[in-house]
Amino acid sequence: MKIAVTGKGGVGKTTLAGGLARLLADEGYNVVAVDADPDANLASSLGIPMEDMADVVPIADMKELVAERTGSKPGTFGTYFKMNPKVDDLPEALSKVHAGVRLLVMGTVKEGGGGCVCPESVMLKALLQHLLLARDDVVILDMEAGLEHLGRGTAKAVDAMVVVIEPGMRSMQTAETIRKLASDLNVQRIFVVLNKVQGPDEEEVMKSRLDGLPYLGSISYNQSIRRSDLEGTSPYDADPAFVDEVRAIKDRLFRELGREA
Ligand SMILES: Nc1ncnc2c1ncn2[C@@H]1O[C@H](COP(=O)(O)OP(=O)(O)OP(=O)(O)O)[C@@H](O)[C@H]1O
Ligand SMILES: [Mg+2]
């Protein structure tokens, strides 16, 4: 099961991704959580103390490793390098394991103009493809804001794209936009989660705007989620109500995908 969590900035992608990863690990799945946001903060949502992350270097920044695996020389440009670097040992070697979740911090590659292909981006792509296609783990991807960052290869390989929205017209990517991007990217299945809901009326209004997009459930607006974020801890450890809501979302997702919940 490979799940990408996407949506606009600040809607709660990282909060949901962290919660889902922790829950699935508690349920006994092998979970790999992938932080694919340049502004990486999935670790704290998973409950990994900041001190434990001090030595973690995003994979895109591991210059020697990238050079070794791709056969490129760091700092040189325009030379040949391998398009199929060995990556199958990297999930084990480069991850932090916490509460049964294996976290990989991908980092980002600043590509030159004109869509140049550089060794770092080849490495990241190869690693992502490996995680999505060659392993049995449950993979949860915490994406950068905006659906358009999901590369075509990645989008096609995920089983479900979960789009987080929050109440309000402006903060909501319209159902139309979501559907169009998903179809452009060739995404298999697309689902919506409503976050920061205050009351049943709000949920009903938002649901009515989904125009047939499959809806998985909601997460209530919750001060303890905010507080956890400020403290750098996980809402999953702080608030059973949040855990229950994440569980309902996960059960629904699994049922929709034809899995035992
Ligand atoms: N249900 C909620 N109730 C209250 N606060 C929430 C809720 N969900 C998320 N937040 C808060 O909203 C902020 C954004 O959440 P989060 O980091 O999960 O969003 P994001 O979509 O990953 O953001 P970004 O686009 O910056 O990656 C955080 O401060 C978080 O604690
Ligand atoms: Mg985030």
Image: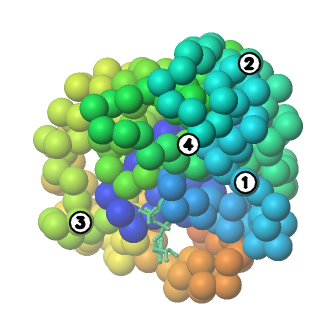
Residue at the spot of label 1: 57
Q: Report the mark closest to the observer, 3 or 4.
A: 4
Task: Let me know if residue 158 appears in the view.
Answer: no
Task: Let me know if residue 57 appears in the view.
Answer: yes
Distance CA(mark 3)–CA(mark 2)? 41 Å
Residue at the spot of label 4: 141
> Pointer 3: residues within 10 angstroms few (<14), some, or many (20+)?
some
Distance CA(mark 3)–CA(mark 1)? 33 Å
> Pointer 2: residues within 10 angstroms few (<14), some, or many (20+)?
some
Marks 4,2: beta carbons within 8 A: no
Q: Residue at x 69, y 41 (%)?
A: 63
Of 161 and 87, nearer the camera is 87
**Image coords of residue 32 (percent x, y):** 71, 39
Q: Residue at x 42, y 60 (%)?
A: 218
**Image coords of residue 165 (percent x, y):** 32, 58
SS label for mark 4: strand
Q: Is residue 248 above or below residue 252?
A: below
Residue at the spot of label 2: 86
Q: Report the mark closest to the observer, 4 or 2.
A: 2
SS label for mark 2: loop
Q: Earlier in the sequence, mark 3 or mark 1?
A: 1
The amino acid beneath tag 4 is: Leu
Q: Report the mark closest to the observer, 1 or 4.
A: 1
The quadrant of the rendering that contains the C terminus is top right
> Pointer 4: residues within 10 angstroms few (<14), some, or many (20+)?
many
Q: Earlier in the sequence, mark 1 or mark 4?
A: 1
In the picture provided, is 108 more to the left or to the right than 237?
left
SS label for mark 1: loop
Q: Earlier in the sequence, mark 1 or mark 2?
A: 1
